[in-house]
């Protein structure tokens, strides 16, 4: 009776554990770019500088990026960003918008040097009394030694379907796309197709309507960012891609089965298949 009970126990153990994923050898992979947190609804009027605050503490070694639009941006000669944790930002300002579209877009990014609560401040150059809307995002897995992959510049037009194309150089890069228009209180829709995800938008504001979105592409090549607006008006779309970190992380490789000499998934007496 004791021997029979032992055989039954071994049989149950073999059948149960044979379907459990087991940790096998370990391998190294590049850390994927991930959106950690974002805030996309910051807006202010008649300012020389204005702020936007992350919902949670930022992490050193991550990258923070920002996108926005400035009304009457043709007078803006530059953009300066600072923050609480002393990130060193690189700012990329779009070209002058087309006639009848006074809003100019901009994108900025930098590597987080220390942890903590983080409030980002923008201070456009070239005047005072600015009106603008913007958003911020924290990203992990971005190359910290040289974050930028490609500056896609910006495209302007007059239609209900703003878009801009960028040709990325690196695989697994993240593309940020920032849009503004001169149509006042009309609807904006980001991520209108092709796998884009909205990061934020402000519409119907007298400060400066804007929207931005992102997508991570596994392969390099030509990409197009799409938006939709509620009327055919002048618009501008700016794109920029950030590349994946070259650093690797170690993760387990999973396999199925349970190797005990003399036991397989059907009971006793044979090796695992």
Image (cartoon, rainbow, N blue to C red):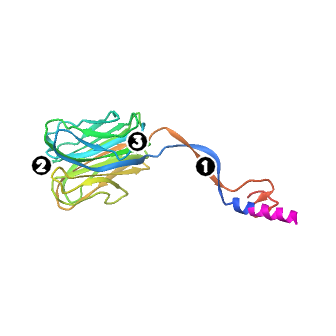
Which is nearer the eye, 3 or 67?
3
Percent across and percent down for residue 148 are 36, 39
Which is nearer the eye, 23 or 131?
131
Which is nearer the eye, 166 or 40?
40
The segment highlighted magenta reads 1-12
Q: Left or right: where does residue 141 sit relative to residue 38?
A: right
Q: Majority secondary structure of the magenta segment? A: helix
Q: Residues within 10 Å of mark 1 (few under 14, many from 20)?
A: few
Q: Secondary structure at mark 3?
A: loop
The mark lying in front, picked from 1 and 3, is: 1
Percent across and percent down for residue 225 are 31, 53
Q: Is residue 153 magenta?
A: no
**Gap between marks 1 and 2, in whole Å?**
57 Å
Percent across and percent down for residue 217 are 41, 50
Which sits earlier in the primary sequence, circle 1 or circle 2?
2
Considering the image in quadrants, where does the C terminus appear? bottom right
Residue 99 marker: 2
**Gap between marks 1 and 3, in whole Å?**
25 Å
Quadrant of the rendered image containing residue 5: bottom right
Q: Residue at x 28, y 45 (%)?
A: 67
Q: Residues within 10 Å of mark 3 (few under 14, many from 20)?
A: many
Residue 243 marker: 3
Q: Left or right: where does residue 221 sit relative to residue 102?
A: right
Quadrant of the rendered image containing residue 196: bottom left
| Residue bearing the label numbered 1 | 253
Q: Residue at x 33, y 47 (%)?
A: 176
Which sits earlier in the primary sequence, circle 1 or circle 3?
3
Which is nearer the eye, 157 or 15?
15
The mark lying in front, picked from 1 and 2, is: 1
Considering the image in quadrants, where does the N terminus appear? bottom right
């Amino acid at each position: 009776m004791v021997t029979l009970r032992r055989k039954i126990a071994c049989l149950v153990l073999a059948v149960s554990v044979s379907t459990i994923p087991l940790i096998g050898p370990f391998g190294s992979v590049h850390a994927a770019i991930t959106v950690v947190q974002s805030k996309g609804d910051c807006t202010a009027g008649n300012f020389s500088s204005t702020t936007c605050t992350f919902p949670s503490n930022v992490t050193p070694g991550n990258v923070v990026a920002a996108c926005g639009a400035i009304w009457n941006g043709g007078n803006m000669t530059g953009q300066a960003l600072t923050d609480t944790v002393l990130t060193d930002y690189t700012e990329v300002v779009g070209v002058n918008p087309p006639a009848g579209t006074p809003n100019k877009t901009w994108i900025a990014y930098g590597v987080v040097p220390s942890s903590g609560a983080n409030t980002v401040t923008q201070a456009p150059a070239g005047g005072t009394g600015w009106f603008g809307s913007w958003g911020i995002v924290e990203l992990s897995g971005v190359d910290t030694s040289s974050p930028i992959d490609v500056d896609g510049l910006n495209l302007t037009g007059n239609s209900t379907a703003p878009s801009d194309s960028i040709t990325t150089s690196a695989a697994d890069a993240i593309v940020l796309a920032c849009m503004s228009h001169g149509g006042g209180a009309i609807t904006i829709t980001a991520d209108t197709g092709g796998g884009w995800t909205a990061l934020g938008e402000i519409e119907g504001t007298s400060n400066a309507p804007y929207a931005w979105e992102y997508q991570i592409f596994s392969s390099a090549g030509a990409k197009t960012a799409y938006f939709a607006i509620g009327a055919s008006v002048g618009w501008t779309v700016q794109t920029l891609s950030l590349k994946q970190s070259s650093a690797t992380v170690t993760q387990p490789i999973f396999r199925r089965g349970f190797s005990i000499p003399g036991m397989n998934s059907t009971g006793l007496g044979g090796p695992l298949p």
